[in-house]
Amino acid sequence: MNLNTGLWQKQQMKLQMTQQLSQAITILQYSTMELNAFLTSKALENPLIQLEDPIMDIPHRGESYSYKTKEKKDFTEFVSASKETLVDHLFLQLDMKSLSSEDLRIMKELLYSLDENGYLHIEEEEFIKRANVQKSRLYDYIDRLQELEPAGVGARSLQECILLQLWRKRDSGLAITIVEDHFNDFAMKKWKGIAKQLNVGLKEIQLASDLIQQCNPRPGAEYTNGECHYIVPELIVKIIGPEEVKVSLFDGTTIKVNYNEEYQDFLEHHPDEEVKRYLREKEQEFQWLLQSLQQRKQTMLKVGKLIVKKQKSFFLKGPAFIQPLTLKEVAQEAGLHESTISRAVKGKYMQTPYGIFEMKYFFSAAIKSVHSEADGAASSTSIKNEIQRLVEEEDKKKPLSDQKIVNMLIDKGYDVSRRTIAKYRDQLGISSSTMRKRYE
């Protein structure tokens, strides 16, 4: 080990993360809505940045790709209007009842203890002390709350929520018994044991299950005043010939950045050097911002063209013909880093003749063919699409097992394992064959 001290010169190449580079990377990964918010904040910091509202002309699925009419609209028109909250809805119902001031006080306490799904979360002993109410009276108030609309509101568990709704339905006796006494076994689809205990057939259990499935496990969710998010495509793909596909940028919803000419005179003739220095700094920031925005457009278009090139069969023939594609492949051909491609496609969407797709949808691993290598490989996305189709078309009385799906895919030329099918099925939100089975 060399422990000598001294001075040495060493030459090495190193990427310096400048402010401009950092800003360009940040802007690239923003979606359209995030970019608009970023530009708005920048305009507040820099007086030389003047924003112009975008020309809102969002293309819709199934409509012609013709953008001749461009009407300038106020951006605030696309902000969702305020919505009645669950508490507001329940208060209106309470106003129609004859309640004393004391009853109304306790009911308000309960309303404010509901979560966004309409469930009641209280520690009974703590609530009794805080609200100064007797335990027996508390249960009366909870009963009153649970009588309100929507059905199921005020429940303290999923089981109680379902029961509150079933009690209001006709011919729900068996369903109520199942939920009251066999809830866990029912959820785990141990129906044969339930049928034996209740001395009923599996067909009757299925009918009760259909009734239970009609219940809403989140009765208060429809009153949640969440922010509305719009999916806006970054790129538009059009078929312009039998074998020709064209991709273009869509700027219809991006705020335009202009130079505020009012400050030009200040910059050239203002006597205060401090003010002129400040404005020169802001002008430099403005130029950096324009360069970053232009670079974002160039990168998005380059990535979009490569996706169209690699997935040409998808755009010409349909989603069933999607091909394997990795970020590394596109990065190598684009001359960019893999992380740059990842940022470019994250949260971005592409309008195609088959609808709007998230750009990362076009990237998926390859699944080997069981035939010769000349047959190529299928993408994991196409395998998932095939699994989805098979499950949708299966006989629900005899749903396909994972091994059966494996065998069917192998017959089609896909080299897949049962473990892979189980993983993809889970990613698609498809339950097991046991859980999908219907008794009729």
Image (cartoon, rainbow, N blue to C red):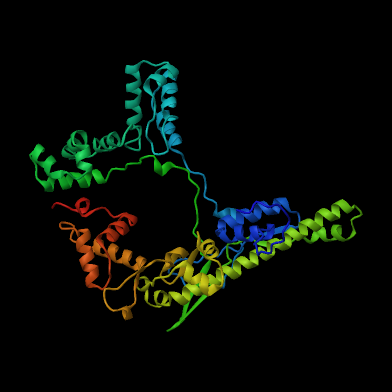
Residue 316 image point, x, y percent: 40, 78
Left or right placement of residue 353 versus residue 266 in this view: left
Residue most extreme to the right: 271
Vertical relation: 143 (above or below) 171: above
Vertical relation: 305 (above or below) 195: below
Left or right placement of residue 277 versus residue 367 in this view: right
Quarter of the image holding residue 279? bottom right
Left or right placement of residue 429 versus residue 338 in this view: left
Residue 140 image point, x, y percent: 32, 22
Q: Nearer the viewer, residue 108 or 283?
A: 283
Vertical relation: 226 (above or below) 329: above
Q: Is residue 30 visible?
A: yes
Q: Residue at x 73, y 58 (%)?
A: 285
Q: Residue at x 33, y 57 (%)?
A: 428
Quarter of the image holding residue 160? top left
Q: How many tags in the picture?
A: 0
Q: Nearer the viewer, residue 303 or 4?
A: 4
Residue 312 image point, x, y percent: 43, 77
Residue most extreme to the bottom: 242
Residue 254 image point, x, y percent: 60, 62
Q: Is residue 74 visible?
A: no
Q: Residue at x 64, y 67 (%)?
A: 294
Q: Residue at x 44, y 31 (%)?
A: 91
Q: Nearer the viewer, residue 99 or 415?
A: 415
Quarter of the image holding residue 262? bottom right
Left or right placement of residue 137 versus residue 407 in this view: right
